[in-house]
């Protein structure tokens, strides 16, 4: 497989997909390395233990949810030394979904998000087992209501259908066996902690995906986690499964392809990966016993990740759009306070629409979502110009300020009876882009300048809004 070349285009693409934006200092740093493989290694060199949120003393539960959301946005935009850690954490949050409204406790959501942030580049088997016994997941998918006398299939079914194998690669008998295996894993409602209830557990031997589980009765409490071992190792897709193409295959290969598609849609585009990319990712995941780093590295080092189609093929979801604007304007998440606008755009952390999470790419191009983006961009425009109409007011950006006098008027021309600003339209646009650390293609620049040329000097400030709404700001 030819290695992708170390070019500015490839480096910017890598950073936009892994670190949310292509910061100029990071572009220069990676371009100074010997190869794209070195650049990928640099991006993947994340801290072992990331910073954790500290809730305000005496804050209410809903306030803590808000604090956690702002904290995570700030980590993505400003505070994480290697934002891929947060990108992967949000990927797992959208894959192993839970929802604050049902979990009902900010501390439990923090516990789960911290799992994705600390171990999100570790091992998928370990992640799946740990999240299965966290109270957030137990409550969200009703395993606290799953007992030998009153089975609740919700968690066992979604573990196969949405989390590890994909639709149609198991039988209803496998759902029943897995449901029984997960009985007894519940929560203690007073302490909000995990609780093993032996009297609720069905401890009989079971056949699951062609394997007999719970043969070693000393492995207590319960044998629910054994179903994850089977799915990611020796399980067989049954002959009566719906997915004809996978019948008789090892479930570890099916799981590796299913998970690889999900990762590809997060980082590349929403089409199926090319066969050579799919096979390389699957083989890396299986060969490394579902370790995440080799799997992610294979995708980021594959020439198929750097094609023109992939580079132009991903719309920023609302969370990443907000992160990009936080980076450009250089403010903390609390300042524009966009949380209520996240619902209008269709994506707010901790509130996925359902257990299948958020859809990728073209899903975000619709009338209501785009209207939400316009309102959100306007919020950032206001924050940037919060002192603009004051004496000596400025527009503030990540890289510095532009004074109002430079934008509107500084010198009065009696001949034309107009005010002449210090900066021409071209110079003003260039300064804005430079201070926002954004580059735009000529076609987009020309459209913004056409607006400025047709506007009064007082309207030129709205060039900022047009930058924030540009196609390039909406694309990863």
Image (cartoon, grey):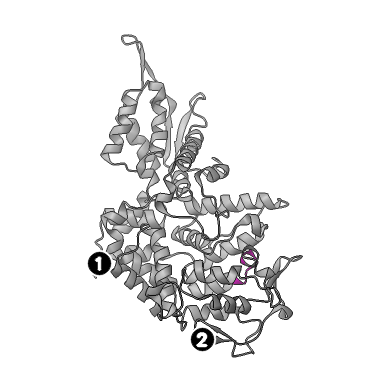
User: Along the line of sight, which residue is nearer the eye, 333 or 239?
Assistant: 239
| Magenta: main secondary structure | helix
- Answer few, some or many: residues within 10 Å of disc 2's Cα (few below 14, many 20 plus, some between 14 and 19): some
Badge 2 or badge 1: first in the primary sequence? 1
User: Along the line of sight, which residue is nearer the eye, 145 or 379?
Assistant: 145
Q: Secondary structure at mark 1?
A: loop
- Check disc 2 and report the residue beneath it: 211
Asked whether, in this view, residue 280 is left or right of residue 247, the answer is left
Image coords of residue 59 (percent x, y): 70, 50
Residue 134 within the magenta-colored segment of the rendering: yes
Asked whether, in this view, residue 272 is left or right of residue 400, the answer is left
User: Along the line of sight, which residue is nearer the eye, 452 or 93?
Assistant: 93
Instruction: Note whether 370 is above or below 5 in the view shown.
Output: above
Residue at image point 37% right, 39% down: 470
Image coords of residue 370 (percent x, y): 45, 41
Q: Quadrant of residue 144?
A: bottom right
Image coords of residue 330 (percent x, y): 47, 43
Which quadrant: the N terminus? bottom left
Instruction: Note whether 399 is above or below 301 in the view shown.
Output: above
Q: Quadrant of residue 97?
A: bottom right
Residue at image point 62% right, 69% down: 134
Residue lying furthest front: 240
Q: Which residues are magenta?
A: 132-137
Instruction: Note whether 193 is above or below 208 in the view shown.
Output: above
Asked whether, in this view, residue 89 is left or right of residue 270, the answer is right
Question: Would residue 333 be visible to someone looking at this image?
Answer: no
- Check disc 1 and report the residue beneath it: 3
Residue at image point 48% right, 65% down: 47
Which mark is nearer the camera, 2 or 1? 2
């Amino acid at each position: 497989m030819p290695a992708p070349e170390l070019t500015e285009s490839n480096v910017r693409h890598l950073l936009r997909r892994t670190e949310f934006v292509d910061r100029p200092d990071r572009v220069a740093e990676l371009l100074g390395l010997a190869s794209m493989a070195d650049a990928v290694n640099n991006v993947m060199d994340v801290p072992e233990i990331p910073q954790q949120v500290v809730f305000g003393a005496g804050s209410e539960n809903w306030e803590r949810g808000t604090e956690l959301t702002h904290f995570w946005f700030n980590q993505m935009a400003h505070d994480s030394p290697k934002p891929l850690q947060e990108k992967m954490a949000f990927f797992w949050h959208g894959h192993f979904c839970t929802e604050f409204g049902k979990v009902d406790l900010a501390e439990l959501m923090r516990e789960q998000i911290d799992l994705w942030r600390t171990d999100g580049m570790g091992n998928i088997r370990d992640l799946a087992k740990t999240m299965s016994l966290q109270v957030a997941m137990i409550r969200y998918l009703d395993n606290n209501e799953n007992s030998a006398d009153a089975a609740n299939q919700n968690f066992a079914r979604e573990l196969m259908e949405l989390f590890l194998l994909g639709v149609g690669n198991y039988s209803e008998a496998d759902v029943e066996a897995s449901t029984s295996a997960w009985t007894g894993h519940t929560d203690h409602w007073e302490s909000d902690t995990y609780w093993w209830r032996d009297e609720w557990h069905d401890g009989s031997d079971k056949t699951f995906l062609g394997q007999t589980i719970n043969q070693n009765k000393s492995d207590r409490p319960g044998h629910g986690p054994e179903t994850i071992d089977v799915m990611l190792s020796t399980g067989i897709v049954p002959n009566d499964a719906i997915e004809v193409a996978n019948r008789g295959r090892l479930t570890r290969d099916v799981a590796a392809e299913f998970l690889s598609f999900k990762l590809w849609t997060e980082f590349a585009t929403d089409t199926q990966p090319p066969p050579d990319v799919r096979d390389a990712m699957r083989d890396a995941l299986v060969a490394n016993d579902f370790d995440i780093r080799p799997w992610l590295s294979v995708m980021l080092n594959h020439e198929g990740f750097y094609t023109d189609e992939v580079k132009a093929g991903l719309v920023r979801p609302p969370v990443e759009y907000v992160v990009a604007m936080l980076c450009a304007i250089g403010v903390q998440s609390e300042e524009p306070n966009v949380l209520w606008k996240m619902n209008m755009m269709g994506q707010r952390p901790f509130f996925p629409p359902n257990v299948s999470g958020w859809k990728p790419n073209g899903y975000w191009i619709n009338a209501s979502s785009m209207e939400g983006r316009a309102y959100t961009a306007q919020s950032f425009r206001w924050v940037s110009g919060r002192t603009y109409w004051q004496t000596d007011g400025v527009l503030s950006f990540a890289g510095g300020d532009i004074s109002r006098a430079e934008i509107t008027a500084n010198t009065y021309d009696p001949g034309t009876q107009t005010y002449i600003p210090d900066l021409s339209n071209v110079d003003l646009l260039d300064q804005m882009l430079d201070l926002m650390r954004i580059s735009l293609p000529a076609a987009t620049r020309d459209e913004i300048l056409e607006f400025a040329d047709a506007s009064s000097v007082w309207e030129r400030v709205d060039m900022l809004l047009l930058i924030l709404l540009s196609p390039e700001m909406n694309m990863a």
